[in-house]
Image: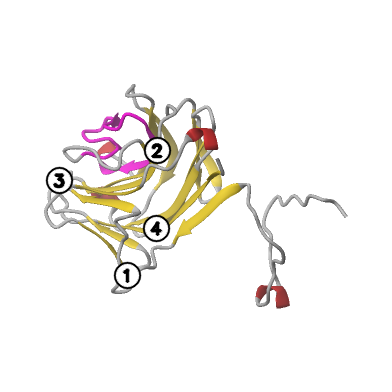
Amino acid sequence: MSQNINVQRTLSFNAQAAIDVNIKGDMLPERMNSIDWFDGDTLDTNLYTVTVGGTNDAIALGQAGEHGVKFTTGTADNDVCFLATGLIFDMTNSPAIGTKLELTNVSGTVVFFGFSDAVLETTPACTIDADGGTVTAVATDAAGFLCDADLGSSSLYCVSVNNGGTAQSLDTGIDWADTIGKRLRVKLDATGNAYFYVDGVQEGYLPLAVADVPLCAIFNAGTRANEGAMTVEARYLAKWQDVP
């Protein structure tokens, strides 16, 4: 029998294996694997930095029945919420992060998900956004997904900024629709190139997206077009990287 088993698609446990012990022995992954399902009573501020930027903003776990973290943005235009992990990612360890996001009203919302060198920005402005229709970075180093009503459409963009330079952007051609959830994943290699996946399919690549600095995983959610409070829901945060 081969000492290595390569799986190109999925490893499925069926019949009795689906309900019985299905892994024996001591597992030791080469890469760190961690998923926060946001199933606690409250957000642990020792693990996350929570910042709200406007009137009536809120970031909370769904004790009333929501499936994950619920971002409720403020009523004023450009109010932005931040939810960020500690600074634990280093591109030399080829980190990747993933989530499933749902937007209630795309035409009135800005949302960013990805890596950032800071847990919040001043003003507040999003890590990277398109306030006024131009993709602009407030962060010094960041890479992630952006969907911004100020871009004039519902397109999902791959965006990044390297060492305070000009922001890169790439339209995936995917239009986000109201109340639709999408699985997003951002992966960095040791050179700082960024790979972007939507619902399991690679939809973008940005070369030299970030410099070699500590990065956190960050969510931004905000109001656009003075449409009042918007809702964005994050179902989970998945994290992977090589074990240093």
Judging by the rendered image, the residue that carries numbered circle 1 is 41
Lateral position of residue 165 relative to residue 236, left or right:
left
> Of the residues tagged 1 and 3, which is closer to the observer?
1
Residue 184 visible? The answer is no
* SS of the residue under disc 2: loop
Judging by the rendered image, the residue that carries numbered circle 3 is 77
Magenta stretch contains residue 127: yes
Q: Residue at x 32, y 52 (%)?
A: 48
Picture coordinates of residue 120, whole percent (x, y): 26, 42
> Of the residues tagged 2 and 4, which is closer to the observer?
2
Q: Residue at x 47, y 36 (%)?
A: 90
Instruction: Locate residue 233: give its quadrant.
Output: bottom left
> Of the residues tagged 1 and 4, which is closer to the observer?
1
Residue 180 visible? The answer is yes
Would you call the spot at circle 2 few (<14 residues within 10 Å), some (14-19), or many (20 or more)? many
CA–CA distance between discs 1 and 2? 27 Å
Nearest to N terminus: mark 3 or mark 2:
3
Q: Which residues are magenta?
A: 125-149
Judging by the rendered image, the residue that carries numbered circle 4 is 180
What's the amino acid at mark 1? Answer: Asp
Q: Residue at x 54, y 41 (%)?
A: 202
Judging by the rendered image, the residue that carries numbered circle 2 is 215
Q: Residue at x 26, y 32 (%)?
A: 138
Would you call the spot at circle 3 few (<14 residues within 10 Å), some (14-19), or many (20 or more)? some
CA–CA distance between discs 3 and 2? 28 Å
> Of the residues tagged 3 and 2, which is closer to the observer?
2
Picture coordinates of residue 64, whole percent (x, y): 28, 74
What's the amino acid at mark 3? Answer: Asp
The number of numbered discs placed on residues in the rendered structure image is 4
Nearest to N terminus: mark 1 or mark 4:
1
Magenta stretch contains residue 237: no
